[in-house]
Amino acid sequence: MKNSKSVRPSANPPARPSTAPGAIREPIYLASQLASICDVDLKTIHNWCDRNEDPDAPAELESFRTPGGHLRFRHSAVVRFLSRWGYPIPDELLTDRPHLMVVEPDTERRAQLIEALSLVRPGREADEPGKDDGKSVHSDDGEHLGLYASAKWYVHLWGDAYAALISAGERAGAGAPMDLAITRLPMDGIDATAWRAALLSRPETASLRFVLIDPTKTALDRNVVGMLESGQFDALRALLDTQAQELGATIEPTPTPARRFEGSIARRERIKIPPREPIYVASQVAHIWNVDLKTVHNWVEKGDIEAFSTPGRHLRFRRRSLLHFLRRYNMAIPPEIAPVRPRVSIIDTHVEHARKLAGTLSTSFEVQVITDPTAALVDLGAQCAGANLIDALIVTLPAAGVDAERWIRAVARHEDTRYTSIVALSRGESNDEAHRWQKAGALATVFDADSSQIAMVLERALGVAV
């Protein structure tokens, strides 16, 4: 691999493999496009390319140059580079193939599925079997959860059906909705019919297809494209290949630069970058709070504030993590990151009760009402994707057909919804129940007789009264 800085375009560049007529080409990005997608400056992109001058230095971001000397980046190389460094993969880079969701509570079965379908972490699809460059920071911890990929699919593995609903909503909100779901019947801890109905309730996922494992004779057949028994991996692979071919035909090719190094000179539309969550550098955070840079680094080292690092080891902060930090320690929220009106979702099967509470809170908050707690997980995931955030939710528990503790735990631990404050509104009077809910992740439990205190709880939790 050569350093991109030392590569000079040849007068007669080597021929590249041609793409079959009608096939979707691998997306190619300009340096400016990649900088916008990854929310960094152009100099940072060039620095990522020039990290291999020292043989012991981390691998560079692979690139090639046009005959005019301009940098170009292949989609697979970009995803592999970001995945290797643990840099959050932007949603814009996950729209080139269908998305498959698998709900499998058993860890060993997930491991078998990964092996049978030859799944790898994103960006490593082109690796030779058994090849390991020793630089990947995304090694499995034995749970085999999260995002995987094959040559034809992005695969989301979940062990919990509640968390899977949030994930499906987040994908829909990010513009790359789930295309196919594989689940075993009966489902663990949730009614399968209600689970599927929740997924089909949103317009983005209304056409979601299902593959059922070990289904009963009474299993519903809406949008079901396959029913298999456990261990039928050959049949599953054949089914997924067929589905990928059908779904892939509906994916629009990603716009590419005006001049492609492969020889095409047709002008194309540049990639449109949708709004995303603001990302702050450490110096900005120090300026916002009027502290020195060392203080910010100390907060990160102690785990008080969440951050991630670029391949250059520079700290980056998501807006929602900054808000979470301020609210957690009851600190004043600077205008630069404060929401105009915090967003609150009320989840209650009793419509009249929910509307009455919404009227009480509407003077200080932007409020919405959801009457189905199962479908609410999909909606919550969609509304917390990208730049959006639900600041708090009020959920009335217990609710029919819902495991309250698992419901709360799923919201409190998911990557995009864990910044949402959860207030449980209890219809009962059980302190033991309230304690379990708060242990699962609820900020507070308010009993029905004390519901007038909810506004005060939210104001303190969201920093409205600070």
Image (cartoon, rainbow, N blue to C red):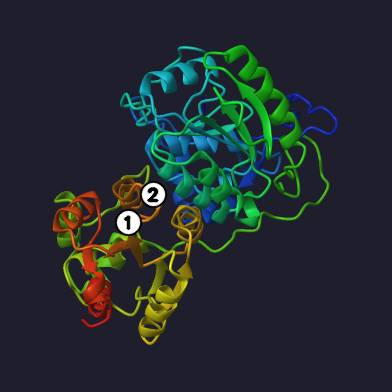
Q: Quadrant of residue 247?
A: top right
Residue 315 in the figure: left or right of residue 109: left
Furthest-right residue in this view: 21
Q: Nearer the viewer, residue 246 or 205?
A: 205
Which residue lies at the image location 48% right of the left edge and 65% below the top edge? Answer: 370
Q: Residues within 10 Å of mark 2 (few under 14, many from 20)?
A: some
Q: Are marks 1 and 2 in contact (CB under 8 Å)?
A: yes
Task: Sort mark 1 into few (<14), some (14-19) or many (20+) by Cα contacts within 10 Å.
Answer: some
- Whether residue 377 is situated above or below residue 387 in the rendered picture: above
Label 1 belongs to which residue? 398
Q: Quadrant of the C terminus?
A: bottom left
Instruction: Tell me if residue 50 comes above or below residue 409 in the rendering.
Output: above
**Relative horizontal placement of residue 313, taking residue 165 as reference (left or right):** left
Alpha carbon distance from label 1 to label 2 = 7 Å
Of residues 211 and 132, the one drawn nearer to the viewer in this rendering? 211
Report the residue marked by disc 2: 402
Instruction: Determine whether the residue tagged by mark 1 lies in a helix, strand or loop.
Output: loop
Q: Is residue 273 visible?
A: yes
Residue 80 percent across, percent down from the top left: 49, 33
Q: State the residue in front, 402 or 153.
A: 402
